[in-house]
Amino acid sequence: MATIEQLQAWHELAQQLRVDSIRATTAAGSGHPTSSMSAADLMAVLLAKYLRYDFNNPQDPNNDHLVFSKGHASPLLYAMYRAAGVIDDRELMSLRKFGSRLEGHPTTVLPWVEVATGSLGQGLPIAVGIALAGEYLDQLPYHTWVLLGDSEMAEGSIWEAFEHASHYKLANLIAIIDVNRLGQRGQTMLGWNTQVYCDRARAFGWRAIEIDGHNLEEIDQAYSAAIHNLDYPTVIVARTKKGKGVAHLEDLGGWHGQALKLDDAKAAIAQLGGERHITIAVEKPEEQPLTATTGQQAQTLQLPVYQEGDLVATRKAYGDALKALGGSRPDVVALDAEVSNSTYAEDFAKAYPDHYFEMYIAEQQMVAAAVGLQVRQYKPFASTFAAFLSRAYDFIRMAAISRANIKLVGSHAGVSIGQDGPSQMALEDLAALRAVWNSTLLYPCDANQTAKLVAEMVDRDGIVYLRTTREKTPVLYEVDEDFSIGGSKVIRSSDGDQTAVIAAGITVHEALKAYDRLKQEGITVRVIDAYSVKPIDTATLHQAARDTAGKLVVVEDHWSEGGLGAAVLDAFVGIGTAPAYGEFGLNLVKLAVRNMPGSGTPEELLHAAQIDADAIVKAVRSLVKQAAWMPTE
């Protein structure tokens, strides 16, 4: 039980956190002071007694983890950093200013912030990934603490997290719901009905503790119970008041995201007892040895080998290569969304079950868990049908803001999947993933290329996406061929190429069929396998344009917007000192899916979409004919 002296010290710290939240947001002229004030007592007790964290060594594997899922309460987090002595008052007052590390919502530019938050509903799912690492891989006794707002409890991703945390019995995961009743535009769905939150959490298999979030003794007791719970995850449902401590702000609507004016701020700070300059020594974690899971020495990588001419689906080659990585890289982990027998992630799962996490049909949780796992320096590969990654797009977008290093694999892409129809066809994935900051997009056309690119993905920073194909396709490349990210392969060429056909994945095979037919007609064509869609091989594209007087055909199994064709065009757009495509006299035909497909055989659908060999031949003929009719100077 806490002493009177402890309770008084915690109260003073909480008041400082409230005062600093007001001061910083008033100086910024924007922010969320009242949302920060409601959780101040909760965070004061956590910081002063329960958090185990070495602020001088944020990478210490024994550290606890604190995730502000309620990212708009960043003033409270930054006030905690000031209280811990790792930022000074001057930096605190730089909140939201250009060039400041204290951004409007927490990002990883601060060494103590492990994931960016601000898009609600993401902190708890990401924390599941961190807790999975602690429970199953690191096997270290750290806890993952998550501060949630009550508004975000309406997000479906939160309940995906509740379900998966219970399934994996993550007793090291502690969620704290700041139930302050008020959201951005008024009362939340449940208001102060904390019992319903508890009932729902218990139905998902969590231990739920209901408390007054301003009663320091109850907070202390709840945290103590949570860290000693060894069986299930714990949620602390804390009833609080928005704007707590200031009479004209408490439980009052209309103040969400509103900073106080200077005179109002002075009055509010006076009510809270004035400014304080408390610095506390946050307790460091006990040193624990890492398990052999992360400490074992890597073995030599033996990638699978395929013979030229064999029919192998690139999705199968992904599974084979991932399994090979599992034997050589103990930091590689895999996740899948209940389609591992189609993505072939099941091969890894069978060989290395301790490094595989089934996320079932919960793509948001899958991507979030991958982000959490990479916090602990693991190399997560997360796979599902490419179409279903769109459900998790916001998590991918936020992962980039977190500067997370995750590998995503989307299978069954494009109309070439055949009879399953358009609901299963990813036709927008390249556009979506290209738009993500610092992303890498790879689209292999054969098995040996796939295996080599999977090996390249492991240590590639950022969001790395591999697009795989359902259909079996001929192996084109010898096993000793190398494929660098940012490169391409010129498969067919001559000194007199009249056009260049640029393809990737399934359309490479259509381009080769077209090449053979055109050659019989006396038309020479360069065929470029643009397996690296982002970054794209600009030099090879520019050379092709020069050699063919700008006559290019791009063919892709994707909507016409934003995919390979757009990437090729971007390679010719002037940025800074880069050349603009006017210099090349560019005459580009873009073959892509333009009408809504239905069911059919892959051959029928490729033909109907006009992205097969017939369409390529027609496009090339048209360009050659145009050139023949052009007047000479």
Image: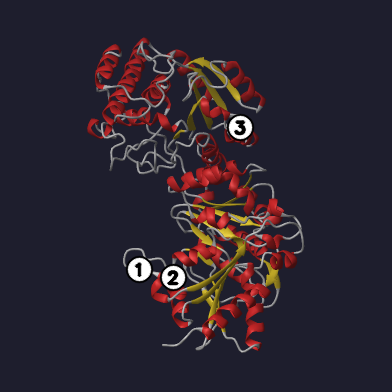
Of callouts 2 and 3, the N-terminal one:
3
Q: Residue furthest left?
A: 90
Q: Amino acid at mark 3?
A: Trp
The answer to which quarter of the image holds residue 55 is: top left
- Which element type, helix, strand or loop, lies under badge 1? loop
- Which element type, helix, strand or loop, lies under badge 2? helix
Of callouts 1 and 2, the N-terminal one:
2
- Which element type, helix, strand or loop, lies under badge 3? helix
The residue indicated by pointer 3 is: 159
Of callouts 1 and 3, the N-terminal one:
3
Quadrant holding the C terminus: bottom left
- Regarding residue 298, the answer to whether it shows in the image is no
**Residue placed at 57% from the left, 61% from the top?**
560
Q: CA distance from mark 1 to mark 3?
A: 48 Å
In the displayed structure image, the side of residue 408 where residue 350 appears, left or right: right
**In front here: 214 or 168?**
214
**Residue placed at 39% from the left, 24% from the top?**
36
The answer to which quarter of the image holds residue 154 is: top right
Q: Amino acid at mark 1?
A: Ala
Asked if disc 1 and disc 2 are in contact, CB closer than 8 Å, the reply is yes
179 is higher (above) or lower (below) than 451:
above
Q: How far from the left and from the top, in percent, is residue 37? A: 38, 21
Marker count (numbered): 3
Which of pointers 1 and 2 indicates the residue nearer the eye?
Answer: 1
363 is higher (above) or lower (below) than 515:
above
Q: Amino acid at mark 2?
A: Thr
Q: How far from the left and from the top, in percent, is residue 80? A: 34, 28
The residue indicated by pointer 2 is: 538
Asked if disc 1 and disc 3 are in contact, CB closer than 8 Å, the reply is no
